[in-house]
Image: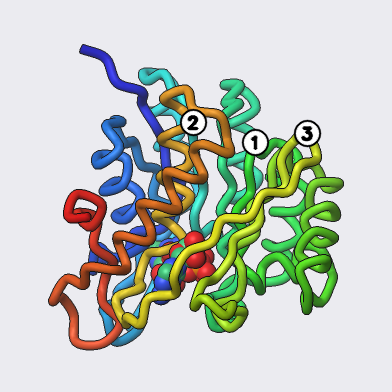
């Protein structure tokens, strides 16, 4: 039996809700084999982040060597990469081993608009990782940083996606603002495909506090599906369905902002 081997290059989140842990849960759920290169470790829980530390650069290089010398990486995604050095080494290995199915989750801003990494790391993501990405998945705030635009309308989402595509990403999925709820109670994600088509994915905004790991899970599901052979737009639809169910059936875990439910899609 063989299954596609899919790699996440990300931080560890010890409560299991986000980062590499969320990616691995998603890879497993989507019947792919998960590989993980840890870049940093976060001590956190459903209440907040208490501490974090970056792993030594030489150790991260050894992780890349261990993985690429032995496994066939059918797809890779990145999560939180907080230094230009780790971004540089990621670019080096993805290029050297010709990983074409690369999904870039540019973890720069939280869903509430707070910046997570420094300006030098942001500029390294733009120069080094966007040009080799098959698909990039910025949230509303990240799309504004990467495009240098303010997004206020549907047309602005399109213009921002075009700008990010001009920086080198083949497909651009902008996760719409949670404040832009339409009259049916739905929020919208916008995909600008390689062929220039703009597709909208609409889903109900669920009134839940169990939202930790949504962005990681979306990008992890997309790369798993692409590694299995799906076209990007189909992979995005599968990931959107996964997410809607994951925020619909709350798990009673954590006292504040708990994890999403990776079994949700099996319940509906
Ligand atoms: N409460 C919610 N109801 C429905 N979908 C949600 C909810 N929260 C997040 N999502 C979905 O999860 C995905 C990740 O988006 P988002 O949370 O904005 O990203 P990030 O975690 O990168 O900030 C998007 O498809 C978004 O629509
Ligand atoms: C190590 C680590 N922790 C947290 C995040 C953020 O995860 P993400 O899914 O992008 O955001 P939330 O939906 O949890 O707000 C991360 N990428 N890495």
Task: Please give the name of the residue rendered at 28% of the width and 68% of the height, measured from the top-left corner.
Answer: 248
Neighbours of disc 1 within 10 Å: few (<14), some (14-19), many (20+)? many
Q: Are marks 1 and 2 in contact (CB under 8 Å)?
A: yes
Residue at disc 3, CB closer than 8 Å to ligand 1:
no
- Residue 249 in percent (x, y) is at 22, 68
Q: How far, Cα to Cα, is label 2 from label 3?
A: 17 Å
Point out the quarter of the image occupied by ligand 2: bottom left
Q: Residue furthest top?
A: 1
Q: Which residue is mark 3?
A: 195
- Residue 31 in percent (x, y) is at 27, 32
Q: Residue furthest front?
A: 184
Closer to the camera, 194 or 148?
194
Q: Which of pointers 3 and 1 lies earlier in the amino acid sequence?
A: 1
Neighbours of disc 2 within 10 Å: few (<14), some (14-19), many (20+)? many
> Looking at the figure, which quarter contains the N terminus?
top left
Q: Which residue is mark 2?
A: 226
Task: Please give the name of the residue rendered at 57% of the width and 21% of the height, measured from the top-left corner.
Answer: 97
- Residue 9 in percent (x, y) is at 46, 46
Closer to the camera, 216 or 97?
216
Q: How far, Cα to Cα, is label 1 from label 2?
A: 10 Å
Q: Are marks 3 and 1 in contact (CB under 8 Å)?
A: no
As drawn, 218 above or below 88: below
Which secondary structure lies at badge 3? loop
Q: Which residue is mark 1?
A: 134
């Amino acid at each position: 039996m063989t299954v596609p081997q899919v790699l996440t290059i990300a931080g560890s989140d010890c409560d299991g809700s986000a980062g590499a842990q969320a990616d691995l849960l998603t890879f497993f759920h989507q019947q792919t084999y998960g590989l993980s290169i840890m870049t940093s470790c976060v001590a956190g829980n459903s209440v907040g982040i208490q501490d974090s530390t970056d792993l030594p650069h030489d150790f991260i290089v050894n992780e890349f060597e261990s993985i690429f010398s032995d496994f066939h990486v059918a797809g890779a995604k990145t999560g939180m990469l907080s230094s230009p050095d780790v971004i540089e080494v990621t670019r080096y290995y993805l290029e050297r081993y010709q990983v074409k199915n690369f999904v870039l989750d540019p973890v720069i801003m939280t869903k509430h608009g707070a910046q997570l990494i420094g300006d030098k790391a942001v500029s390294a993501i733009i120069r080094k990782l966007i040009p080799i990405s098959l698909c990039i998945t910025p949230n509303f705030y990240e799309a504004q940083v990467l495009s240098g635009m303010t997004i206020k309308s549907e047309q602005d989402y399109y213009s921002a996606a075009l700008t990010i595509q001009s920086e080198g990403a083949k497909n651009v999925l902008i996760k719409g603002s949670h404040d832009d709820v339409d009259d049916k109670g739905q929020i919208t994600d916008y995909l600008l495909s390689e062929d220039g088509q703009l597709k909208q994915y609409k889903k109900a905004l669920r009134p839940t506090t169990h939202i930790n790991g949504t962005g990681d899970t979306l990008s992890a599901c997309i790369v798993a599906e692409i590694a299995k052979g799906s076209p990007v737009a189909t992979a995005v639809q599968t990931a959107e369905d996964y997410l809607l169910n994951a925020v619909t059936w709350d798990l009673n875990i954590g006292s504040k902002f708990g994890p999403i439910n990776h079994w949700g899609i099996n319940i509906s």
